Image (cartoon, rainbow, N blue to C red):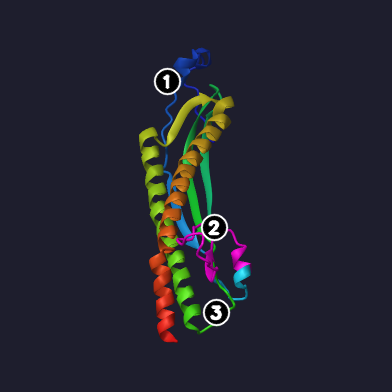
């Protein structure tokens, strides 16, 4: 916290608007904005049966008609986790009862924790195993691409928001500084959440495009030739 020495003994008796005019809330530093996409090491699980995998919640829809019997030969599981934290600085002028709020840092982490499953019925080294594994890696690659894309979008959106509104807020009554800080936190969180929701929608579209009839038929044709 920083103090401001009284320049005149009568300053405490000024009206609130005059007091506020004596205080300039100017950011001392430009806020650091960190939007970082991260990924855990890929885990592989070849111990589940087709029936086991069919019990998983699968986001994409089978491209085949309902009458077409299918089984789940493999899948990629990996929720995208988002964490957002904002750090603030406060500057209080106790002698006049007003202060300022500054944004110090905004930190956003978008994390993928992926596991690739291939049904145990497809023995390792077989064509089906290798082709399914290759297919599931396409899903993982698409997740990485969409996370990288929206990390950039979120970072730019935050910068634009701060540029338009500034990095400093106030002066406000000291008793209101905590409320102002919470309001700013909610606003930044709302911006990040909106982009996160857009990312999930695009992710769904991208993943669905991979699970196409053409893709499945090509895998089946390649393994048929190898027999």
Mark in front: 2 vs 3: 3
Determine if the magenta segment contains residue 30. Answer: no
At horizontal 46% and vertical 16% (from top left) the residue drawn is 17
Mark in front: 3 vs 1: 3
Task: Please indicate whether residue 34 sits to the left or right of residue 54 in the image.
Answer: left
Seen in the picture, residue 114 relative to 128 is either above or below; the reply is: above
Rounded to the nearest whole Å, what is the CA distance between mark 2 and mark 3? Answer: 25 Å
What predominant SS class does the magenta segment belong to? loop
Sooner in the amino-acid sequence: mark 3 or mark 1:
1
Pointer 2 local density, CA inside 10 Å: few below 14, some 14–19, many at least 20: few
Q: Which residue is mark 1?
A: 21
Number of the label disc, if any, that sits on residue 79? 2
Which residue range is magenta in the image? Answer: 52-79
Please tell me how many numbered marks the rendered image carries.
3
Pointer 1 local density, CA inside 10 Å: few below 14, some 14–19, many at least 20: few
Number of the label disc, if any, that sits on residue 122? 3
């Amino acid at each position: 916290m920083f103090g401001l020495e009284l320049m005149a003994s009568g300053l405490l008796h000024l009206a609130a608007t005059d007091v506020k005019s004596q205080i300039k809330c100017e950011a001392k530093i430009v806020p650091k904005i960190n939007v970082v996409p991260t990924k855990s090491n890929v885990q592989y699980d070849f111990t589940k049966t087709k029936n086991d995998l069919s019990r998983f919640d699968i986001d994409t829809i089978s491209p085949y008609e309902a009458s077409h019997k299918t089984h789940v030969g493999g899948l990629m599981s990996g929720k995208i986790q988002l964490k957002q934290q904002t750090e603030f600085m406060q500057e209080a002028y106790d002698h006049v009862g007003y202060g300022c709020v500054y944004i110090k840092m905004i930190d956003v982490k978008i994390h993928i924790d992926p596991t690739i499953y291939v049904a145990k019925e497809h023995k390792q080294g077989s064509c089906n195993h290798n082709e399914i594994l290759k297919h599931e890696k396409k899903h993982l690659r698409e997740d990485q691409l969409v996370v990288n894309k929206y990390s950039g979008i979120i970072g730019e959106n935050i910068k634009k928001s701060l540029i338009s509104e500034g990095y400093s807020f106030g002066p406000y009554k000291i008793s209101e500084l905590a409320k102002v800080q919470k309001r700013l936190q909610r606003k930044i969180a709302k911006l990040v959440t909106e982009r996160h929701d857009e990312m999930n929608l695009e992710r769904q579209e991208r993943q669905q495009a991979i699970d196409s009839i053409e893709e499945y038929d090509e895998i089946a044709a390649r393994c048929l030739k190898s027999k």
